[in-house]
Image (spheres, helix red, strand yellow):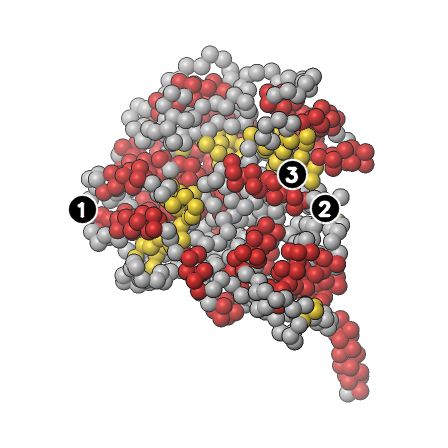
Amino acid sequence: MKNLLLIAVSATFFFAGCSYDPPAPIQVKRMDREIDYLADVKPILDRRCVVCHSCYNSPCQLKLSSYEGADRGASKELVYKAERLRAQPPTRLFMDAETTAEWRKKSFFSVTGNTAPEGFNNTTMAHLLRAKMRSPLSPGEYRPETDLLSCPKNGEEVAEFIDNHPERGMPYGFPALTTKEYETLLHWLQQGAHGPNEAEQKKLVSPSPAALEEIGKWENLLNREEPKYRLTARYLYEHLFIAHLHFPSAPNAFYELVRSKTPSPEKIEVIATVRPFDDPGVEKFYYRIRKIHSTIVHKTHIVFEMDDEQYEQITRLFIGTPWLEEPHLMDYDEVRSANPFLTYAQIPPESRYRFLLHNSEYITRTFIRGPVCKGQIALNVINDHFWTMFLDPKSDLSVQHPEFLIREAKNLSMPIEKGSSMGVFSTFSDRYRERYLAYMRDKGEFYQRFGVGTSLKDIWRGTQADDAPVLTVYRHFDSATVRKGVLGQLPKTMWVMDYPQFERLYYALVAGFDVFGNLSHQTNVRRYMDFLRIEGEATFLTFLPQKERVKTFRSWYIGDDAAEDIKGIAPNYVSNIRYSGPHYKQEFIEQVVDKHLLKETAIAFDHNYLHLGEKVPDVLPEHYDSEADYLQALRVVARPGTAFMKVINGYNANLALVRVVRKEGADLVYSIVINRWHDNVNALFDEDDRLDPSKDTADFIKGSVGSYPNFFMVVKEEELPDFFDLLEHYEETPAYEARLLRYGVARNDLDFWKHYDWFQEHFYKAEPIQSGMYDLNRYYFRAW
């Protein structure tokens, strides 16, 4: 008994010694004026906090892009949790709870609540801001998405975090706020951290008169009672639920489409299902359009234009076209709803496909940029750079013969039909692989029955100037970019997509993907994406000479036995394209663009950045008098094997923005996009083992590419000779590092925020509709 007592007493002293007392409250002098959230606070949060706290990857789920997010606070629950065996309840702001009290029940805790006596402040936000003011330098390395942040929820945890990491105050790993910014936030917190008043809030969420008129027109279309309209609305909602809707008549705001229990003009009561095709759970609901009042961040800013042309196309494709059956409503059966080829079988596939094609840039962006914010689990399935095209509807036999899709509906089913919590034993099931292979065999036999061969006319060329029949995709490790047109050097692979592939990509990676789902759900979706990638590549291969197809495919899948599957899935029909030499990929894209698209759409080669068949210059230019000189220099330093390419070979060095400060005229911005060579991308694990840095390439694109810049660089025009000499001969020595930092903006550079503000403002001016706030979570981790 005596020994037990001694142990208990010793343990008490031990744990008491490891506990922390809350930090002393911060004294805040009284301020005569009231701090205004919209005028004083929100601009600071936007410029200095939203850059990391805006998406699912926000540290501690603290989203500061709106007052509601700041008031909701933080959570210790991780959204990205690889070992999760069960799906967790979603925590989507403005969707899964409405009030602060509801968020508290979901384990969110305040970062702005003050319990100190009058004249003092003990909020979590205040203490973390003060920590950075006291230790403004940021030594070491910072990876906010992978660092084990403690997300302190009370005074004791705040004290422990600051004691262990005094340099990790906020902004995390970047320079401190100015004294004025710090004091503004401190006084706001001291005064109660109030948000917009009732009148201001009403203005924030209320559409403009011009937007209201547009909203009325679209809501009338989406909420008509006839079955043809109801099923059309359901299809549109499932494809637009993550869109930022834009009305040309109301250019300064964006909107979103939701399902509501209430009709217009009543207040929207959102039906918050996990997926857009889930049963709404009510007999009567309405499609409503509500204004987005959070700060627009580029990662989640996927714009869908709601103009008159869009309205006319939708009504023509879906309402004005005869359907395959008498229009009737479909139920929300869990399995059937996850299969668009069953749910929408009565709508002509050509109508569905042409809707996707006329919005190909938007649809592709949804599964390349969203709905996740930390997309490595989805993106290590694609190569770093490829071009994608689309099969013309007239050449797509699944569109021309809808009975084929009905017959293949089971083989076209996807893992999303199992929901967010697939059983752990099904994590590596071959069920969907077998169905996919069966579909591809059936598809090959179906096409061969018609004696089909491939020709240039089979590539969709678009019907209007703003169509996007050719898209460039760049992967930046765990984020990606879609750009209209043919950008960059000749990539390793290309895709040609038909309707069934395009639709399944969307449903598997967007409509049916749950970022809160369990390990089995996310793994099976990732594995299914392997099949869809191969499908697009296999369709492209049918445009090459038959003797080249298997050889070309194997060159994309070095060291992967699964590549043998191509023999069973690549249709063996003849290509009717005439080639003059052995460079088939190059000739194909040249013929597609020059002969088919150049005169009829806005798509063409950008000759500034695409130099197919040309010899790369081996020497830097003697003078830097024009953009052509800059681009020649960029091409020289980006040759495989140069010092620049040898150094830029880490996951945190995928995308840099370079500002050229000119003596005359506006400054220029270029994006340096690094494309890493993968021997194959057909495996879940050990990506490093499949990289070949000797084959890496870099593209230099004018303007801003990507949502997550890894580095900013600022070069004066007269410094360009030294800058390019540095890149061409770079060595990892202190002398070269010092030269690099003359141009590069390290995360602890005292002028970091000045440079960031310039790049952000330039982005807004250059792309007023498509731009949004950059995310700095993946800025280069090292603080020199």
Indicate the amino acid at tag 1. Glu
**Residue reaching furthest to the top:** 580
| 10 Å crowding of disc 1: few (<14), some (14-19), many (20+) | few
For the C terminus, the image quarter is: top right
Which is nearer the eye, 136 or 93? 136
Count of labels in the image: 3
Residue 712, numbered circle? 3
Residue bearing the label numbered 2: 750
- Left or right: 287 with respect to 418? left
Circles 3 and 2: CB atoms closer than 8 Å:
no
Residue at (65%, 44%) from the top-left corner? 754
Which is nearer the eye, 531 or 27? 27
- Element type at mark 2: loop
- Element type at mark 1: loop
| 10 Å crowding of disc 3: few (<14), some (14-19), many (20+) | many
Q: Find the distance from the CA under tag 1 to the CA under tag 3.
A: 58 Å
Horizontal and vertical percent for residue 173? 69, 51
Indicate the amino acid at tag 2. Leu
Residue at (31%, 62%) from the top-left corner? 266
The label nearer to you, 3 versus 2, is: 2
Residue bearing the label numbered 1: 326
Q: Find the distance from the CA under tag 2 to the CA under tag 1.
A: 67 Å
| 10 Å crowding of disc 2: few (<14), some (14-19), many (20+) | some
494 over 504 or under it: above or below: above
- Element type at mark 3: strand
Indicate the amino acid at tag 3. Phe
